[in-house]
Amino acid sequence: MSPGPLFVVVGPTATGKSELAVSLALRLGGEIISADSVQVYKRLDIGTAKITPLQQKGVPHHLLSFLEPDEEFTVAQFQQLARSTIESIVARSRLPFLVGGTGLYIRAVIDPYHFPSHQGLDAVRKHLRSCVETGRSAELYADLQRIDPDAAGRIHPHDHRRLIRALEVYSLTGRPISSYWAGGAAPPPPYDLVMIGLDCTRSELYRRIDLRVDKMFREGLVDEVKHLLDRVFDSNLKPLQTLGYRQVIACLAGEYDLDTAIRLAKQATRNYAKRQLTWFRRDHRIRWFTLTEENSSEIICEEIIRYIYSKKNT
């Protein structure tokens, strides 16, 4: 059986991936699967620049806004949901588009990532979180360096969420998490991949990020955060510690003023975009297209269409 098609659209935040994917899906008869680790949550709309129904232009979108902010969600769950959604799209004779900037979500779908069982997870996680909360994260990181130096090289000592996850996997399975990243226990999903990367110059990227952050605050990001906190969602929840939300929560707590929150949100988003580019640049399957003043998203869309058809005919 020949592999089914899967179009993947990636790139740093604020480059217009969602808009481009809608244009491509309209032209090619596709449906879109969001690969964004925060857009899976309801009520987090402005701060995630979540595509609106009007902007979707009738193109079906999947894996958007289906969880409450306090619900646990893992990469393994995303992998399962995304792959089953791809199957259902292909079964309808439509083309699936996997679109987003969360690199691990993308790789979990298109590569043979394998995730361990969750049996016994709660007790292990409680112990590891207790270690972090009592100031022993350096000890945990030293443990990770000893048992899985490959993972330690890719996880920052202060990235407590990923640190805990790596140690959870080892505690539950006796295998380092990097061995699951490597795969090899099963063949990759049967996808005929076309991977598109959207990029622009550093100055243009920063300009777009600044405009996006300004727009978020102008459209009511502060009120969105207030409503979330009014619904008794804990400000320490993982989705509320992401870009924009973290800065607004600190502002509301009196740590700094609104102008500082906006400035810090812009800087954090620029840093995140650089990390995204570093991640995606390692994947040589991606064909990159660069946005410039001359190369608008419409022109890029036409270039990508020509590229897709050229691959199809080779």
Image: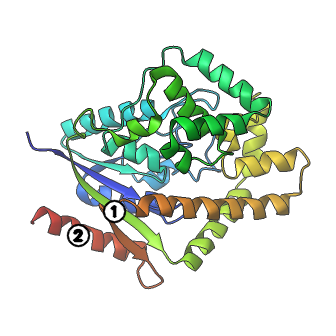
Looking at the image, which is closer to me, 300 or 184? 184
Q: Give the side of residue 254 with respect to residue 85, left or right.
A: right
Number of numbered labels in the structure image: 2
For the point 49% across and 63% down, the residue is 277
For the point 76% across and 61% down, the residue is 264
Looking at the image, which is closer to me, 221 or 133? 133
Looking at the image, which is closer to me, 277 or 293? 277
Check disc 1: other Cα within 10 Å, few if <14, some if 14-19, many if 20+. many
Asked which secondary structure carries label 1, the reply is: strand
Q: Give the side of residue 234 with respect to residue 39, left or right.
A: right
Asked which secondary structure carries label 2, the reply is: helix
Report which residue position mark 2 lands on: 307
The answer to whether 60 is drawn above or below residue 268 in the figure is above
Q: Are marks 1 and 2 in contact (CB under 8 Å)?
A: yes
CA separation, marks 1 and 2? 10 Å
Residue 203 pos. (x, y %): 59, 79
The quarter of the image holding the C terminus is bottom left
Residue 42 pos. (x, y %): 58, 36
Identity, as a three-letter code, of the amino acid under mark 2 = Tyr
